């Protein structure tokens, strides 16, 4: 079955910033190889990536339950599509790499998933929340318990029994099971799903990656005061130019996090030392240098340092970003400059809206576009029902409203001639009459809605499918429901549309 994918650009124009140079002087450290994962063509691409002349197009995301919202898939497909375009244009190996941000500790953002049930209602499945006083454990250290089995059982019950359901659930349970951690489950599920497309997964939380990255975090700490000043100056420049500054630049903050007594904690500058923001543990630069040498897994970068470390250790020519990342990348300029790292290019990922056949049928039946479903629930239904109201009823209401306005205008003028204080009481009565007519119309529409249950139900189903909970589909729904309905063809069709989008981007990379 062919699905309709509507590309929904994240920003105006179709440009993708081209890097100043493709030869950024980055050679992959052989020690990083264990940090990469891939299956099928993805495994072959790991070998290609370690060729001297190879480049990569990257994207990334913090781990999410069952791979998180649809936009995670779209990020990965975007990296695949752009790598293909760049490889064809340059005549050299360009590999798509997905960076699994397993250091992230926001469990509340990662512990849930939303699926559209067979009753056409968005259903949220959620792992138990952390206790309020629980440590901020990085997701790569967040082990799944038996609760994951209950969620998978619930997901199976919510979704239709199709020819594809068994394979889709087998893919899920291979990775999301008790004993696995959130980051490994997330990354391996993507590598499994998109191995045939050539996707390579990078795990920056792997011990090998931590050892290579840690020196860059030490450099950021050594330049902590300078970076603090430059980042706050940059924030001022952006604000003065009318641009957003989404990442707070509070005085004294560093760009490095450390696993401490309260979990992942920000290091702040305190004289010549560093102090964790929440637990108040004190560190000297020497003690952090020693930590980087003997236990680098305890150090991690914040969102402004992360792309700089990527550019320092991977031969990235371009990074595919979502709207949040696109907003904060302008803040990173002082970090690249201070640490002496040449930045990669960056640009928007593919964004799309899926219009399933039953939704298309509903839209066409009532002459609607998907955007018509963005209004408050019931609004478009009321308009369609109003249009179906008998013409004699709508005509009578229209004539009555005009008559009330016309005659009360005359009455107000006459009343004011008798006594100025009569104007407000007369206006009040006019408003009451108009309100009464509105109530009559509402009653007529309400009764018509009852008589048009099919229309109301079909539009509600279409709205839930395209704008669940009033939000864009790609930011709410998980891909599992589409794998169950359409099988592997879903990913193949999505990749085809993403490839077409990639061909529209300009300019091509420079040789």
Image (cartoon, grey):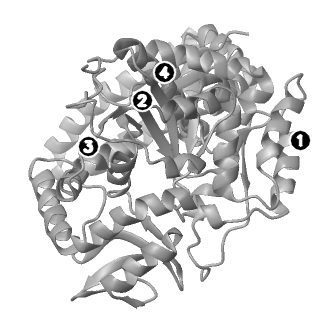
Few, some or many residues within 10 Å of mark 3 (<14, 14–19, 20+):
many
Few, some or many residues within 10 Å of mark 4 (<14, 14–19, 20+):
many
Sooner in the amino-acid sequence: mark 3 or mark 4:
4
Indicate left or right for 271 with 206 as reference. left
Indicate left or right for 83 with 473 as reference. left
Sooner in the amino-acid sequence: mark 4 or mark 1:
4
Quadrant in which the N terminus appears:
top right
Sooner in the amino-acid sequence: mark 1 or mark 2:
2
Disc marking residue 54: 2
Say which quarter of the image contains residue 93. top left
Residue denoted by label 1: 157
Which residue corresponds to the image point at 67% horizontal and 57% vertical from the top-left?
182
Few, some or many residues within 10 Å of mark 1 (<14, 14–19, 20+):
few
Disc marking residue 343: 3
Which residue corresponds to the image point at 38% horizontal and 14% vertical from the top-left?
91
Residue denoted by label 4: 81
Viewer-closest of 11 and 304? 304
Image depth: mark 3 or mark 4 in front: 3
Query: Where residue 95 sits: x, y (%)?
Result: 48, 29
Sooner in the amino-acid sequence: mark 4 or mark 2:
2
Query: Where residue 60 sits: x, y (%)?
Result: 49, 43
Q: Are marks 2 and 3 in contact (CB under 8 Å)?
A: no
Secondary structure at numbered mark 1: helix
Q: Are marks 4 and 1 in contact (CB under 8 Å)?
A: no
Which residue corresponds to the image point at 22% horizontal and 42% vertical from the top-left?
415
């Amino acid at each position: 079955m062919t699905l309709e994918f509507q590309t929904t650009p994240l920003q105006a124009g179709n440009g993708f910033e081209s890097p100043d140079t493709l030869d950024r002087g980055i050679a992959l450290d052989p020690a990083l190889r264990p940090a990469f994962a891939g299956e099928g063509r993805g495994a072959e691409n790991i070998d290609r990536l370690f060729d001297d002349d190879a480049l990569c197009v990257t994207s990334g995301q913090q781990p999410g339950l069952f791979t998180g919202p649809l936009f995670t898939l779209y990020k990965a497909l975007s990296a695949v599509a752009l790598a293909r375009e760049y490889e064809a244009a340059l005549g050299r190996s360009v590999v798509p790499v997905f960076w699994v941000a397993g250091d992230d500790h926001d469990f509340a953002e990662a512990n849930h998933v939303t699926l559209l049930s067979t009753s056409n209602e968005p259903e949220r499945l959620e792992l138990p929340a952390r206790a309020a006083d629980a440590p901020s454990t990085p997701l790569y250290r967040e082990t799944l318990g038996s609760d994951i089995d209950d969620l998978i059982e619930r997901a199976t019950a919510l979704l239709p029994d199709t020819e594809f359901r068994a394979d889709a659930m087998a893919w899920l349970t291979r990775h999301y099971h008790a004993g696995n951690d959130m980051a490994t489950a997330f990354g391996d599920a993507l590598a499994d799903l998109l191995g045939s497309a050539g996707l390579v997964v990078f795990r920056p939380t792997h011990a090998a990656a931590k050892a290579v990255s840690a020196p860059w975090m030490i450099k950021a700490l050594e330049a902590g005061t300078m970076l603090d000043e430059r980042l706050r100056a940059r924030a001022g420049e952006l604000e003065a130019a009318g641009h957003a500054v989404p990442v707070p630049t509070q005085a004294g903050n560093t760009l490095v996090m450390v696993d401490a007594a309260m979990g992942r904690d920000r290091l702040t500058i305190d004289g010549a030392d560093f102090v964790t923001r929440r637990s108040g543990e004190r560190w000297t630069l020497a003690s952090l240098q020693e930590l980087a040498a003997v236990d680098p897994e305890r150090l991690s970068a914040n969102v402004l340092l992360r792309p700089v470390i990527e550019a320092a250790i991977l031969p990235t020519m371009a990074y595919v970003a979502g709207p949040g990342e696109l907003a904060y990348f302008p803040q990173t300029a002082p970090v690249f400059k201070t640490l002496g790292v040449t930045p990669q290019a960056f640009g928007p990922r593919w964004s799309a809206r899926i219009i399933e056949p039953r939704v298309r049928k509903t839209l066409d039946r009532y002459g609607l576009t998907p955007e018509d479903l963005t209004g408050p629930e019931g609004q478009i239904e009321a308009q369609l029902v109003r249009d179906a109201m008998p013409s004699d009823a709508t005509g009578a209401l229209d004539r009555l409203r005009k008559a009330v306005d016309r005659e009360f205008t005359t009455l107000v003028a006459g009343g004011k001639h008798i006594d100025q204080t009569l104007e407000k009481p007369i206006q009040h009565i006019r408003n009451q009459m108009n309100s009464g007519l509105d109530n009559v119309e509402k009653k007529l529409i309400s009764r018509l809605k009852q008589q048009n249950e099919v229309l109301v139900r079909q539009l509600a189903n279409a709205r839930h499918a395209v704008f669940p909970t009033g939000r864009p589909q790609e930011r709410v729904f998980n891909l599992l429901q589409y794998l169950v309905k359409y099988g592997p063809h879903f990913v193949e069709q999505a990749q085809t549309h993403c490839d077409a989008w990639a061909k529209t981007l300009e300019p091509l990379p420079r040789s």
